[in-house]
Image: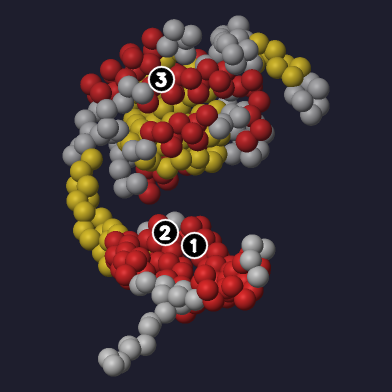
Amino acid sequence: MNIHSVHLLWLLLLLPLFIRLLWRRDKRLDRRFKRFAEARFRDFYLGDISPFYSNLKLFLLIIAFGFLVFALARPQWDYREKEVHNQGLDILFAVDISRSMEATDIQPNRLMRSILQISSFVDKLKGDRVGLISFAGAATLECPLTNDIEAFKMVLNSLDLEAAVRAGTEISRALTLAGRAFDAAASEGVLILISDGEDLSSSSFQIAQELAGKGIRIYTLGVGSEAGAFIRNPHTGEVRLSKLDIHTLRRIATIGGGEFYHVTPSAQEIQLMLSHIYQSEKGESQSRHLNLYKEQYHYFVLVALLFIILESLILPLKRKAPTGEK
């Protein structure tokens, strides 16, 4: 059995509290009655009330509450087969989060502009799957390929320069990880590399060629300017000039069978790149059979409803002994 929302089972900890309150109910009723009348009048006013049936009604409601908690947690068992069709492309974004991406030669800075461009890009997609890699001196798969655009955007907007696992810029690591991500998804697709092109690795062109051999097309987005901007290392205080390396990014795109585009504030390159991708790539219709758990919460709801109905049928009155006829 699988529980979809396990955290809701914490509500079951209320059951011992309810049972304890039920156990002390008679004593509380006695104390409350004594506040308004003398104890000798209790039988006169409450003599017909049965403590047993009153407590039984409350106990049945407590049991119903327990079953409703299980229903809310969505218990699942057995399997149902579902066929999923996907006619879109698989598009993986690799975003440079190295220190040079804080340069402000494009506003608000290179990284924020990259995030804005990607967000604008995915808003225009038509049923495609998207994924996200961040890289600097090392690469991290932030979001595997998914159809959930909102979840993708949440991960995208959380990117920042402090998330870099290691300093530096090695595009080859992003390309290698992209290849593994496409292999894991058992698909060919499109890789969109967003960077200022400053690359400390020497194997990026070779890996790009290997990806192209696997049917993965590489597009590059250059962010920044060739004039560059000064950036300051917060740890050493060193100030250096960071420039957009168009040559490196253009060559990677050429090797990868894609195109190079220069990021601009107007974002016109997004529509151009998207049009080129849809013209060049054909999303293959894929059909997959998934075994999914069956939702079984309705059984628990029915049992809870039965206890509630049973509780409503019980009158909390003492049974009167039958009187014989004279």
Give the vertical position of 224 relative to 88 (above or below): above
**Type of residue at label 3?**
Ser
Toward the right, the furthest residue is: 237
Which is more N-terminal, label 1 or label 3? Answer: 1
For disc 3, the marked residue is 120
User: Badge 3: few (under 14), some or many (20 or more) residues near its Cα, within 10 Å?
Assistant: some
Front in this rendered view, residue 24 or 109? 24
Whether residue 320 is visible here, answered yes or no, is: yes
Badge 1 marks a residue whose secondary structure is helix
Disc 3 to disc 1, C-alpha distance: 40 Å
88 left or right of 263 in image: left
Q: In which quarter of the image is the C terminus?
A: bottom left
User: Badge 2: few (under 14), some or many (20 or more) residues near its Cα, within 10 Å?
Assistant: many
Front in this rendered view, residue 292 or 281? 292
The reply to whether callout 3 and callout 1 are in contact (CB within 8 Å) is no
Nearer the observer: mark 2 or 3; the answer is 2
Give the vertical position of 27 relative to 204 (above or below): below
Which color scheme does this rendered protein use?
A: secondary structure
For disc 2, the marked residue is 73
Q: Which residue is drawn at 43% across and 67% down?
A: 61
Whether residue 203 is visible here, answered yes or no, is: no
**Type of residue at label 1?**
Leu
